Amino acid sequence: MAGTLLLLLLSLSITTNLFNNALAANPSHDFLQNNLGDSDFNIGGKSIFDDSNDVLDCPSVICRESGKATFLIVFGDSLFDVGFGIEELCLPSNYTPYGQKLNKFGRFSDGRTIPDFIAEYVFGAEERLVKPYSCDLTKTESQFKENNRTLSFARAGAGVLEGISKETDKNTGRTLEEQVELFVKLNDTIKLFGEDSKRKEETLYLISIGAFDYLREIANKTQNGIDPTEVVNKIVDAVRNIAAKGGRRFAFMNIGPLRYYPIVQKLNLDEKTLGELDRLVEQHNKELKAKLPKTLKDSKYSYSILDYHSIIKNIMENPDSYGFDIHTIKSACCGWGPFKAYSCGSLDKVGCGEHSIEDYVFFDGMHHTEHINHLLAKIFWNSNELASPKNLKSIAGLEKIEFDFPGF
């Protein structure tokens, strides 16, 4: 069993390596609306559940006032990966049907990731795609400084303690520590922010990592097991390192309900094992929420934590309330075998088959469809309950910006 999961993780992430319209139409909105209310999702006086069209009141980064977020730096694993090392690594995200809505490879989804949507909200430009780190420093420097103002070090298979990939390649980034080291060295080399310390303070640092550490625990059960305290402490250390380099604004996603991932469901694990996985994730999320305020207690810092776990858990446990079909909720759109848990982009190059992609929460065995990524980004940006202690628009200093959310 352990070997099977490890093989699946490798298949999904490295080697062959990894609400929708119905949500808006559902009158109950169940968990999201009942717990938050439309008022918590108001943008320009309108709910994000409203189908009407709004217009961006600030169409360009040029009109950002002093104090607004003007750069976006991303760290994490495959949920946030936008093509790290795409030129050197052979990943399934380089093949159809990944990126089919963008006609662009490198993302473990059918379209945009959460950071892509956040970049759109920060810079006020539609489909402002986050740019991945490249070994070509000239390319990285030009696209960051002169145009895009985004840079992602997130990499498929990355972990906090150890990445899935142990092979020697031209890139690092297998752990959060390595990603932060890449960022620090890059900034020291090409001066990403120039000599202006204020630019560092106006940068938003987006972080989502840790799932692979706990999935590996299921694959490689040891006598002592993994300690969530060690994992969270490593994340906190990384935050301290970024803060020491001038970072002031941070955004985090906690760990999702891993038991519902198709790659885990495929294993048909007993309840004791799933309970242990739940316990690890719960402890991780509690410690992250408890330790970040102590680390970022100075008033010069601001941060947000998205309760990603609660959002996905409630969708998976109450699919009817969100317009999902009970027959597709547990399965991925793209993949092979039980629950379509693996081989998207290799054995499966088509995807959802007879069903619409809007019928699925997961695009492959671990990653979401663009629709779900869009929803998560909207909640991260606007919610006063599921994104705390502040939402992202407050962190970015863009409380009054208005958005059009077609299809929701």
Image (spheres, rainbow, N blue to C red):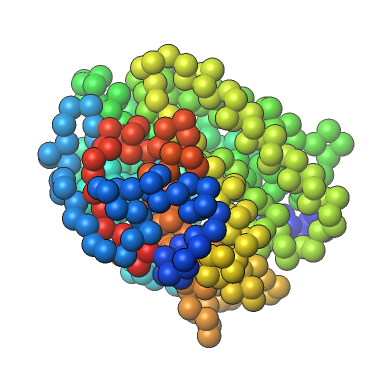
Judged left or right of residue 106, residue 262 is: right
Q: Quadrant of the C terminus?
A: bottom left
Q: Position of residue 160 (x, y in %)?
A: 60, 36
User: Horizontal placement of 63 versus 160: left or right?
Assistant: left
**Residue at the extreme bottom of the image, as rendered:** 354
Exactly how many numbered labels are in the figure? Answer: 0
**Quarter-wise, where is residue 205 in the image?**
top left
Q: Nearer the viewer, residue 372 or 220?
A: 372
Report the residue at 58% width, 59% height from top: 315
| In the displayed structure image, the side of residue 221 where residue 63 appears, left or right | left
What residue is drawn where x is 70% and y is 73%?
Answer: 338
Can residue 84 be seen? Answer: no
The answer to whether residue 162 is visible is: yes
Residue at far left of view = 63
Q: Position of residue 92 (x, y in %)?
A: 51, 64
Q: Quadrant of the N terminus?
A: bottom right
157 or 72, nearer to the observer: 72
* Residue 47 in which image quadrant: bottom left
What residue occupies the far top of the structure in this picture?
A: 298
Q: Is residue 100 above or below residue 287?
A: below
Q: Position of residue 128 (x, y in %)?
A: 26, 53
The residue that appears at 25% across and 47% down in the rendered structure is 44
339 in relation to 45, above or below:
below
Q: Which x, y percent locates residue 61?
A: 17, 41
169 or 343, which lies in front? 343
